[in-house]
Image (cartoon, rainbow, N blue to C red):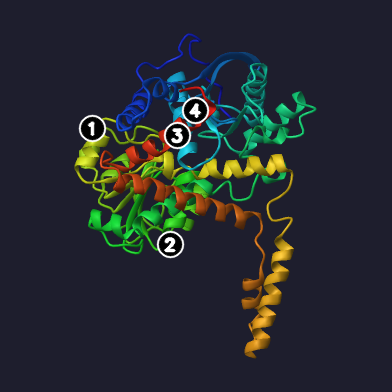
């Protein structure tokens, strides 16, 4: 049974004070903007958060009334709808939401997803509420968004984030549909839904899988590996992953399956380390059974989990929360590559220290974009009202089967049943989603890396990604005729 709900903080507490996360995002933007020959007014428009909705609403919790604080920020309307997750956490405040919304704008642009950036948050700890109470809070939050036109398939499309998942997205979709009775595309008001409620297959693993594709492209890039004085490929790479939630688990799983050795997994209550490599599936089974990764027989438990960030490895994947690598621990980081699975895990003060050490930082706005890429596919599915693969899967199988039969007849040799099925099989929804994700991540990587190597003003991969993103957004505004 859930423990007693904690009361919300004072309604006047919009901010937690200075936001290093928002400052970091703006500092990265400014660094990239200084390399571009664009009008100041245009850059100011791209940088600013267009709309922020702060709300307080009452919810009946355990027989009493709790006033809940929540936000929704729409950072940019250069393309519509806006897009971004909703997080449930006590750390949520307006500046965090604005920072995350800004990152979503730049992230969508860099991977060519035609959305503006947005983000939402509710200041609660979901662990202190029952499922029924969370449903009440989620539905009331959705109603507040509907009141102010901050949700809709052509307006603003939320998605899961920290503390939320498919369950909450289904509640949001159901609430929206109750109010938008004549909206034929109402299911497209939110993504990350269960498959049975209009979700898309492949969404759950998308962010971790996208991170894997990005890292794979980097370590197979001979030009980049030569610059880093590293060998190509994943087979000799040791990996440490911070966070074993959805993103961290899938990133570790795919990197391990591709030949990398995952030697450390870090969670909030400790870490597991094994220099010979961790069995990711066995660790996940242990976590699901025990509720923690600690005590896993296949590795050594380290109580000071965050200290494992400083262990020697080739690739470090911070996939937890923001501001995990700061100026206080940056000098002790030994990884050669940092692939940001979380949003903003490195502060702007820490980044110069890491770059001076020769560490390659693969930025969050590109590396963890797999979630929004597949959310885009889900949105397309919802507004087209047809499952991917439904129209052509059997036709493709028939064409492939006839091709196999022709080859067998001409060569006089036959394939086994297993071989025939493998060659003839048509693509289903998950195949197509994963293929689209892979193509997007590969294309985006090469766009960013060409800026990195080809622009003499660009000295790091984050600036390269920001330059690419800002140029695309600027072109969008200029095409609209807003700026001369």
Q: Position of residue 134 (x, y in %)?
A: 62, 27
Structural distance between the alpha carbons of marks 4 and 3: 14 Å
In what quadrant of the picture does the N terminus appear? top right
Q: Is residue 295 visible?
A: no
Dot 4: what SS?
A: helix
Task: Please tell me which residue is depicted at 45% across the width and 12% down the height of the picture.
Answer: 13
**Tag 4–tag 3 contact (CB < 8 Å):** no
Q: Position of residue 274 (x, y in %)?
A: 33, 56
Q: Nearer the viewer, residue 386 or 257?
A: 386
Structural distance between the alpha carbons of marks 1 and 4: 40 Å
Point out the tag, 2 or 3, that comes first from the N-terminus.
3
Residue position for label 2 = 258
Structural distance between the alpha carbons of marks 1 and 2: 33 Å
Point out the tag, 4 or 3, that comes first from the N-terminus.
3
Residue position for label 4 = 477
Residue position for label 3 = 106
């Amino acid at each position: 049974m859930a423990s007693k709900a904690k009361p919300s903080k004072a309604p006047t507490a919009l901010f937690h004070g200075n936001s290093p996360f928002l400052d970091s995002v703006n500092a990265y933007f400014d660094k990239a903007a200084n390399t571009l020959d664009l009008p100041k007014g245009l850059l100011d428009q791209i940088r600013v958060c267009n709309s922020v909705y702060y709300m307080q609403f009452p919810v009946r919790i355990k027989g009493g009334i709790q006033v809940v604080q929540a936000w929704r920020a729409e950072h940019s309307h250069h393309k519509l709808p806006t897009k971004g997750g909703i997080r449930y956490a006590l750390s949520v405040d307006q500046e965090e939401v604005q920072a995350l919304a800004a990152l979503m704008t730049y992230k969508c642009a860099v991977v060519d997803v035609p959305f503006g950036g947005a983000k939402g948050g509710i200041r609660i700890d979901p662990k202190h509420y029952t499922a029924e109470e969370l449903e009440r809070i989620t539905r009331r939050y959705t109603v507040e968004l509907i009141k102010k036109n901050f949700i809709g398939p052509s307006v603003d499309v939320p998605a899961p984030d920290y503390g939320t998942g498919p369950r909450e997205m289904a509640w949001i979709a159901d609430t929206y549909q109750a109010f938008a009775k004549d909206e034929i595309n109402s299911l497209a008001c939110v993504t990350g839904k269960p498959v049975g409620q209009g979700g898309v297959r492949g969404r759950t693993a998308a962010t971790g899988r996208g991170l894997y594709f990005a890292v794979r492209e980097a370590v197979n890039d001979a030009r980049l590996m030569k610059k880093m004085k590293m060998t190509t490929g994943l087979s000799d790479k040791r990996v440490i992953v911070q966070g074993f939630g959805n993103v961290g688990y899938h990133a570790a799983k795919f990197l391990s399956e591709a030949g990398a050795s995952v030697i450390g997994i870090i969670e909030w209550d400790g870490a597991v380390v094994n220099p010979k490599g961790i069995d990711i599936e066995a660790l996940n089974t242990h976590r699901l059974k025990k509720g923690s990764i600690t005590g896993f027989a296949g590795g050594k438990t380290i109580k000071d989990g965050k200290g494992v960030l400083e262990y020697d490895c080739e690739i470090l994947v911070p996939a937890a929360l923001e501001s995990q690598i700061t100026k206080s621990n940056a000098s002790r980081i030994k990884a050669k590559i940092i692939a940001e699975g979380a949003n903003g895990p490195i502060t702007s003060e820490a980044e110069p220290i890491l770059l001076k050490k020769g560490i390659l930082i693969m930025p969050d706005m590109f590396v963890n974009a797999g979630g929004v890429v597949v959310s885009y596919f889900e949105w397309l599915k919802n507004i087209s009202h047809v499952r991917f693969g439904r129209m052509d899967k059997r036709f493709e199988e028939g064409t492939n089967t006839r091709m196999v039969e022709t080859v067998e007849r001409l060569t006089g040799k036959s394939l086994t049943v297993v071989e025939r099925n493998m060659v003839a099989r048509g693509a289903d929804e998950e195949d197509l989603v994963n293929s689209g994700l892979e193509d997007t991540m590969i294309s985006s990587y090469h766009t960013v890396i060409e800026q990195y190597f080809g622009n003499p003003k660009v000295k790091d991969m984050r600036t390269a990604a920001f330059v690419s993103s800002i140029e695309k957004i600027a072109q969008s505004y200029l095409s609209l005729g807003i700026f001369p």
